[in-house]
């Protein structure tokens, strides 16, 4: 008896992939702007980047990666009809997203207390655009995880219906990928 093989396909809905493409292009332009402007104005970027905490950036990296791992685990659980475990993994993904938001909010607040002006120069403007825009994407991801978690607790997802969690995970992986470029570009490479 021959085993039927399914054709490989992208996880999630096609619409989420269009969104991911648009967001990657938008952030790509911001990344290029940051890199080019840093090259042209190193005297402006050096003190701004020196004031950023590598430890905070690294902690945020761990939180985002942990949330991505939890999102994958949730989808895998739904694919194998383990809805309760999937809901727990969604809650773990949400915890990683909220952890990032707390750490980043603390970083933003400490900058404001230190007199940081969001548009003093090219560095502060691009830092604000990049990190603020990414922050908003993490907020959206946290909302998505929350909605998915509530639905998962009600038994909405299983082997026959896991497209929404897979699409949420795809969106979150994009958020994670953007940080994997943003963190070295803004915090590490000087």
Image (spheres, rainbow, N blue to C red):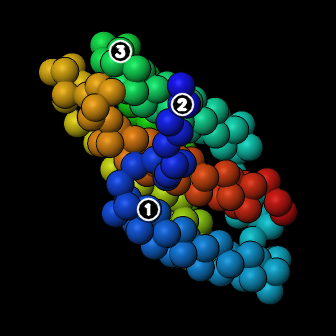
Q: Is residue 49 left or right of residue 15?
A: right
Against 110, residue 95 (above or below) is above
Name which residue lies at 54% across and 30% down: 3
The CA span between labels 2 and 1 is 30 Å
Q: Position of residue 117 (x, y in %)?
A: 51, 67
> Of helix, strand and loop, which one carries label 2?
loop
Which of pointers 3 and 1 lies earlier in the amino acid sequence? 1
Mark seen at residue 33: none
Reading the image, the residue beneath label 1 is 17
Residue under circle 3?
A: 82
Asked if labels 1 and 3 touch by Cβ distance under 8 angstroms, the answer is no
Residue 169 in the image, given as x and y percentages of width and height:
44, 42
For the residues carrying marks 3 and 2, which lies nearer the camera in this image? 2
Label 2: which residue?
3
* Circles 3, 2 touching at the beta carbon (< 8 Å): no
Residue at 80% from the left image edge and 67% from the top image edge: 46
Q: Residue at x 49, y 57 (%)?
A: 134
Graded by Cα atoms within 10 Å as few (under 14), some (14 to 19) or many (20 or more), the crowding at tag 3 reads some
| Label 3 to label 2: alpha-carbon separation | 24 Å
Task: Name the foreground residue: 50 vs 141.
Answer: 141
Q: Quadrant of residue 18?
A: bottom left
Relative vertical location of residue 95 with respect to residue 13 in this rendering, above or below: above
Percent of width and height locating residue 91: 36, 23
178, above or below 159, in the image: below
Taking the spot 45% from the left edge, 73% from the top edge, the residue there is: 22
Query: Where on the picture, by quarter, is residue 31?
Result: bottom right
Secondary structure of residue under mark 3 = loop
Disc 1: CA contacts within 10 A as few (<14), some (14-19) or many (>=20): some
Q: Is residue 113 visible?
A: no
């Amino acid at each position: 008896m021959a085993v039927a093989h399914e054709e490989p396909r992208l996880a999630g809905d096609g619409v989420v992939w269009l969104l991911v493409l648009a967001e990657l292009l938008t952030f790509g332009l911001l990344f290029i702007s940051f890199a080019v402007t840093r090259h042209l104005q190193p005297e402006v970027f050096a003190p701004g980047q020196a004031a950023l905490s590598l430890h905070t950036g690294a902690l945020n990296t761990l939180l985002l990666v942990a949330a991505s791992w939890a999102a994958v685990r949730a989808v895998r659980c739904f694919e194998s009809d383990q809805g309760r475990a999937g809901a727990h993994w969604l809650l773990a993904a949400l915890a990683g997203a909220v952890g990032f938001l707390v750490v980043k909010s603390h970083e933003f607040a400490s900058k404001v207390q230190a007199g940081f002006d969001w548009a003093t120069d090219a560095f502060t403007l691009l830092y604000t655009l990049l990190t603020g825009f990414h922050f908003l994407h993490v907020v959206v991801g946290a909302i998505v995880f929350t909605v998915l978690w509530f639905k998962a607790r009600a038994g909405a997802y299983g082997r026959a219906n896991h497209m929404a969690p897979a699409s949420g995970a795809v969106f979150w992986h994009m958020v994670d990928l953007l940080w994997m470029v943003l963190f070295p570009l803004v915090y590490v490479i000087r």
